[in-house]
Each structure stands twice: as structure tokens, then as C-alpha cells.
Amino acid sequence: MSLFSLEGKIALVTGSGQGIGLALAEGLSEAGAHVVLNGRDKAKLERAAEAMSAAGRKVSVAPFDVTDHAAVEAGVATIEAEIGPIDILINNAGMQMRAPITEFPIEGWHQVMATNLHSVFYVTQAVTKRMLPRKRGKVISIGSVMSELGRATIIPYTASKGAVKMMTRGLAAELGKHNIQANAIGPGYFTTEINKALIADEAFTAWVCNRTPAGRWGETKELVGAAIFLSSAASDYVNGHLLMVDGGLTAVV
Ligand code: GCO
């Protein structure tokens, strides 16, 4: 199992005060990593960190806004100076907004693209320029089944997740020779905060269960295995890959 061990590694997980990000951070810490929780709400991060350290996990907090380039650069510099070199980056921070394109607020477009895409560029740039001379690193970005498929009312989210897939391929092209592996995870329909309204909608839940071969919504802990795999030596020859964790949704019509 040493192939999957993250002992001695430092992992930054953006947007990890709750939801998928926190589940991934907890999973990576159980695999041995020293996880750095990130988000805008320092109090929420500290509450999560307190619970994790009470369970004997190695955890720190780094509150900064991933949509603010200057704050990202300063935040990453502080992590590397005060905690140590970042070995693993999980670009998880993201949001959802739903409306037909003909009614979608322009400010909403900018907000979704800033949170889901610009942040991935800012944090990945700040982290990989420090990984590069070390000749090692793992970059895992959270894509989506919407990296490959469209659904009405979520065009900005879908565009951002398609871009995350293609950014991952570009990162593989540029950084692979420096022993930095860049991959992505594509969640299907999970019981997360951003999907609360969908879960409460009986017709939508029926659609998810019929459209997904697994016949159910995914639970956030079911993303942890893919994150540990892509963060560990077990994936040293995996690069530019979008690993779907979707119950089979994208495998079938
Ligand atoms: C929607 C959902 C999806 C899910 C799915 C994508 O409105 O269809 O929010 O976008 O979030 O997990 O990965």
C-alpha cells in the first residue's frame, strides 16, 4: 500500500472548509498528508482544522480568496515559507449558478468563471512555479461530468469545467517532463451543497437515478479514492487524464 501513501507530503486543497473539498482534505490526511485547508472564511477553516487535529491529523489553514491573484500569490508564498513545499495541489474551489443563457446575469457569468476557472489558473501558476525546480508535484483539478456533457441552465459552469479539462491537458504537455503530473477528477451527481435544490426535486432525483448506471447520487467520500490515487506515487505515469467518478453516467446514453 506504500504506492498510495501520502506520508511526508504537503497538500493544499482549495475550497476545503466544507463539502467535497473538506472530504478530500480529510481523505488525504488519512493517507498521511499534512493538509492545508483553504477558503475565504477563516473561522470555518479553523473549525474544520480543529476537528481534524483532534482526530490526530496533520492540518493547517491558509485563508485566501482564490479569485484574487495577488492574494493567491501571497497565500502560496506564506504556505511554502511557514509550512513547507507544496507537493500536492487540489483545485477544488467552485460554484454553481443556474439560469437559461437568455436570462443569465452578466455578473453571474463573471463570478462562475472567476471561481471555477480563473482560480485554477492563479493557484496552479503560483504552486507549479515552485514545484518546477523541485522536479516533482501533483496537480489535481476538480472537473465534472460537465467537462464532457452539456445540460440546460448551466452553460457558464459547463464552459468552466470544459476549460478545466483542457487546462489539465495543457499542464500535462508543459510540466510532464518536470515530473509534475496534472490530472482532473470528474464528479457525477453528488449530494453536495450546490446540488441541494436538485436533490430536493423528486423529478430531478428520478432522472439522476435513471441516467446513472449506479442508480443513485454519489456521496462525497466516494471521491476520496480517486484523489488519493492521483495524489500518490501510484499515478506517477498518469498525466492529463480526466478520471470520471460518476457512477457510469458518461459511459452510457
Ligand atoms: C447540475 C449539477 C451538476 C453537478 C455535477 C457536475 O446543475 O447539473 O450541479 O453540475 O454539480 O456534479 O459534476
Image (spheres, rainbow, N blue to C red):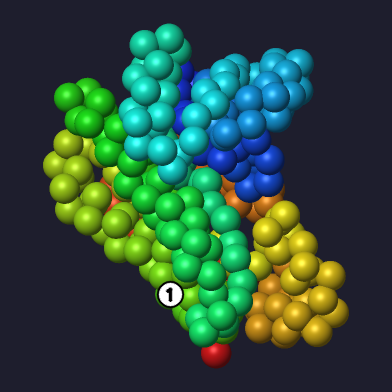
Choose between 62 and 224: the one closer to the eye. Answer: 62
> 96 or 1, which lies in front?
96
**Which residue: 35% across, 63% down?**
163
Q: Can residue 41 be seen here?
A: yes
Q: Position of residue 188 (x, y in %)?
A: 59, 67
Q: Would residue 127 be found to the left or right of residue 107 on screen? A: left
Q: Which residue is mark 1?
A: 148
| Quarter placement of the C terminus | bottom right
Residue reaching furthest bottom?
Answer: 253
The local secondary structure at tag 1 comes to loop
Q: Name the residue rendered at 54%, 75% in the picture.
A: 104
User: Where, by quadrant of the figure, is residue 245 drawn?
Assistant: bottom right
* In this rendering, position of residue 2 left or right of residue 42: left
The foreground one among 136 and 167 is: 167
In which image quadrant can residue 86 be found? Answer: top left
x, y percent for residue 105: 53, 70
Image point 47% across, 68% down: which residue? 106
Q: Position of residue 223 (x, y in %)?
A: 60, 51
Farthest-out residue, top: 82
User: What is the three-letter code of the residue carrying label 1?
Assistant: Glu
In the rendered image, residue 205, in percent from the top left (x then y), is placed at 78, 77
In depth, the one of 53 and 238 nearer the eye is: 53
